[in-house]
Amino acid sequence: MNFQRGKRHDDLEMNLVPLIDVLLVIIIFLVVSATFSRTSELQINLPTAEANATQEKPLTIEVGVDASGKYTVNNKGLAETSVAAISEALQSAANGGKEPTVIINADANTTHQSVVNVMEASRVAGYTHITFATQAKSGS
């Protein structure tokens, strides 16, 4: 019994837009809340090597200054105490080597001028690497 004879019924359609919205929200929630673990990672302790690369021993020139102001270059005494004589002795001790390190062994009671003369002679010879030899106090 159809009591509404003159009316036509429209075809029913399913609205998919709300379904797609809900699915996108669920996918975003799953991606954000998921924990990603690294299952293929190996825990490895690598061995260490004790061998060092061979290094060339740097060229060193030892200059000694005693309390009386006498100079020695590589344990050879110098007759003159002028800056030029010390510079020549440094150059001959270097034997044409490049950038030697000048080690100043000065007595504790030597004058400052004697040490400054060695430093000036090193500058004149063109050697910029200068260091001072010290010793540790006994009983410390």
Image (cartoon, grey):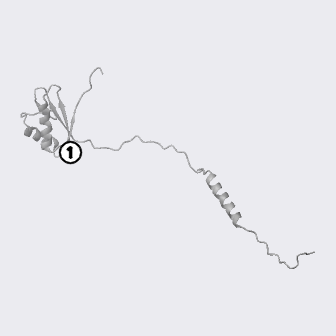
Q: Within 10 angstroms of label 1, few (less than 14), some, or many (20 or more) residues?
A: some
Task: Name the quadrant of the C terminus.
Answer: top left
Q: Residue at x 70, y 64 (%)?
A: 18
Query: In the rendered image, which quarter is residue 54 located in?
Result: top left
Query: In the rendered image, which quarter is residue 76 located in?
Result: top left
Task: Establish if 29 lies above or below 15.
Answer: above
Task: Establish if 122 lies above or below 31.
Answer: above
Which is more toward the observer, 36 or 15? 15
Q: Residue at x 51, y 43 (%)?
A: 45
Question: Viewed as shown, does residue 16 lie left or right of 58?
Answer: right
| Residue 43 percent across, percent down from the top left | 54, 45
| Residue 93 percent across, percent down from the top left | 15, 40
Query: In the orientation shown, which residue stands out farthest toward the bottom?
Result: 6
Question: Viewed as shown, does residue 135 lie left or right of 24?
Answer: left
| Residue 106 percent across, percent down from the top left | 17, 30
Total residue callouts: 1
Task: Establish if 27 lies above or below 134.
Answer: below
Which is more toward the observer, 124 or 14? 14
Task: Check disc 1 and report its element: helix, strand or loop.
Answer: loop
Q: Amino acid at mark 1?
A: Glu
| Residue 6 percent across, percent down from the top left | 86, 79
Query: In the rendered image, which quarter is residue 82 located in?
Result: top left
Question: Viewed as shown, does residue 48 lie left or right of 52?
Answer: right
Q: Residue at x 18, y 26 (%)?
A: 108
Residue tagged 1: 99
